[in-house]
Amino acid sequence: MSEFSWILKGRCYKLGHDVPHAGGVVPNRIIIGRHFDAKDIIPHLFEETDPGFHTRCQPGDIIVTGQNFGMGPKMNGYIAMRALGLGLVCESMPFLAYRAAIGCGLLTMTDCVNATEMCDTGDELEINFRDGFFINHTRDIRREYPPIPDTLLEIVELGGNTGWLRQWQSNRHKETAS
C-alpha cells in the first residue's frame, strides 16, 4: 500500500445528534442536482448546519458528531470532506451512511460512545483511525474507540471504491499481460 496517514491532528468541529445528510451535511439541492465533483460541493458543506464551515476548516480537522449522523445513503458530503482532508468521528451513524463514507475514502470511526462529551469545537484533537485512539490535547483526554475494521482499510487507503477498483483493474491488466 502507498504512503498514507491514518492519524489526523487538527481542530474539532462538534455537531449534535440526528444530523441528516440532506439539509445537515449538504443542502438537498446538491443531492438532487447530482453534484459529485468536490469543487462543486465544498462551498455547500455544512451550509445549513454551520454556515461558512468550508472557509474555516483545514486539512486534518475532525468533525465529531452525536448519534444518527448522516441519515440517508448519500455520499455528496463525504466526497467534500475527503477532498478537504477531514476526518469523522461519530457516536453512531446508519449503516448505509457509514458505507457511503468508507466508499468515498473518508477516515471515519463510528460507535464512539460519548465522543461529543469528550470535546468542544476548537479543541485540538488527534485521532488514529487505524488503531482507534482519540486524544483531546486541549482537555488531556484519551479514549480508545473501535477503529476502521481491517477489512475496510485498503478501500479507505486507496481513496474509496473508485481507487480500489482502479487498482483491481490495473492488477488484472498486469496478470493478463504476463
Image: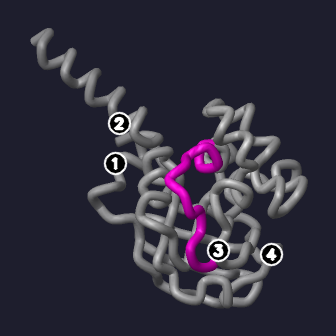
Query: What is the distance, in whole Å, between disc 4 and disc 3 at their CAs?
Result: 18 Å
- Badge 4: residue crowd in 10 Å (few <14, some 14–19, many ≥20): some
Do the residues bearing badges 4 and 3 touch, measured as CB atoms within 8 Å?
Answer: no
Q: Main secondary structure of the magenta part?
A: loop
Q: Which residue is mark 2?
A: 164
- Badge 1: residue crowd in 10 Å (few <14, some 14–19, many ≥20): some
- Badge 3: residue crowd in 10 Å (few <14, some 14–19, many ≥20): some
Q: Quadrant of residue 34?
A: top right
Q: Which residue is mark 4?
A: 121
Query: What is the distance, in whole Å, between disc 2 and disc 1 at their CAs?
Result: 8 Å
**Residue type beneath disc 1:** Glu
What residue do we see at 42% from left, 33% from top?
162
The numbered mark, 4 or 1, whose residue comes first in the sequence reads 4
Q: Position of residue 172 (x, y in %)?
A: 19, 21
Q: Secondary structure at mark 3?
A: loop
Tell me if 78 is positioned left or right of 165 in this view. right
Q: Which residue is mark 3?
A: 18
Do the residues bearing badges 2 and 1 touch, measured as CB atoms within 8 Å?
Answer: yes
The question of residue 37 being in magenta is answered with no
Query: What is the distance, in whole Å, between disc 2 and disc 4 at their CAs?
Result: 33 Å
**Residue type beneath disc 3:** Asp
Please give the range of residues in magenta. 65-79
- Badge 2: residue crowd in 10 Å (few <14, some 14–19, many ≥20): some
The colour scheme applied to this rendered structure is: one colour
Labelled disc at residue 154? 1
Q: Secondary structure at mark 2?
A: helix
